[in-house]
């Protein structure tokens, strides 16, 4: 029975590679906010996120005035998106 289970396992693992990749998870609230922006606003937000002179709190306060409340922590995590300690938004 063990051999049969291993054969079944291999077949199932092979089948996984035929399936489309799953999303790793929902976007964070900053990513969701950014996705809803127009091109100019999204570019401005991205510039702010990339700028080390602009604090996460400043960005969080600005986003919160225009949309759902976002914390500075969430902005900081979004700035590290794609890294192991960042959010799951696409880079
Ligand atoms: Zn994010």
Image (spheres, rainbow, N blue to C red):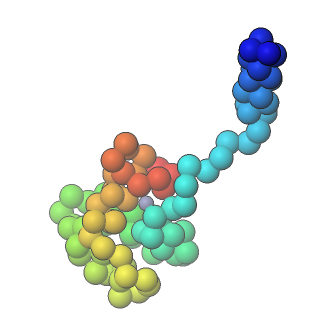
Taking the image as four quarters, which one is ligand 1 found in? bottom left
Q: Residue furthest front?
A: 1
Q: Is residue 55 visible?
A: yes
The residue under the point 77% across, 20% down is: 5
Nearest to the observer: residue 38 or residue 12: 12
Relative height, residue 3 to residue 21 (above, below): above
Nearest to the observer: residue 70 or residue 44: 70
Q: Position of residue 38 (x, y in %)?
A: 54, 75
The residue under the point 33% across, 58% down is: 77
Q: Position of residue 47 (x, y in %)?
A: 35, 63
| Picture quarter with the N terminus | top right
Relative height, residue 8 to residue 72 (above, below): above
Relative height, residue 42 to residue 63 (above, below): above
The residue under the point 48% across, 73% down is: 33
Relative height, residue 87 to residue 65 (above, below): above
Tell me which corner region of the image, top left, top right, bottom left or bottom right, holds residue 58: bottom left
Tell me which corner region of the image, top left, top right, bottom left or bottom right, holds residue 21: top right
Tell me which corner region of the image, top left, top right, bottom left or bottom right, holds residue 83: top left
Side of 25 relative to 60 (left or right): right
Q: Position of residue 23 (x, y in %)?
A: 61, 50
């Amino acid at each position: 029975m063990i051999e049969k289970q291993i054969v079944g396992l291999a077949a199932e693992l092979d089948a996984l590679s035929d399936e489309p990749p799953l999303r790793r998870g929902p976007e964070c609230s900053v990513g969701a906010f950014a996705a809803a922006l127009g091109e100019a606003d999204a570019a401005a937000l991205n510039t702010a996120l990339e700028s080390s002179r602009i604090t996460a709190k400043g960005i969080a306060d600005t986003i919160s005035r225009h949309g759902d409340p976002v914390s500075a922590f969430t902005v900081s995590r979004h700035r590290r998106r794609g890294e192991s300690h960042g959010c799951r938004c696409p880079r």
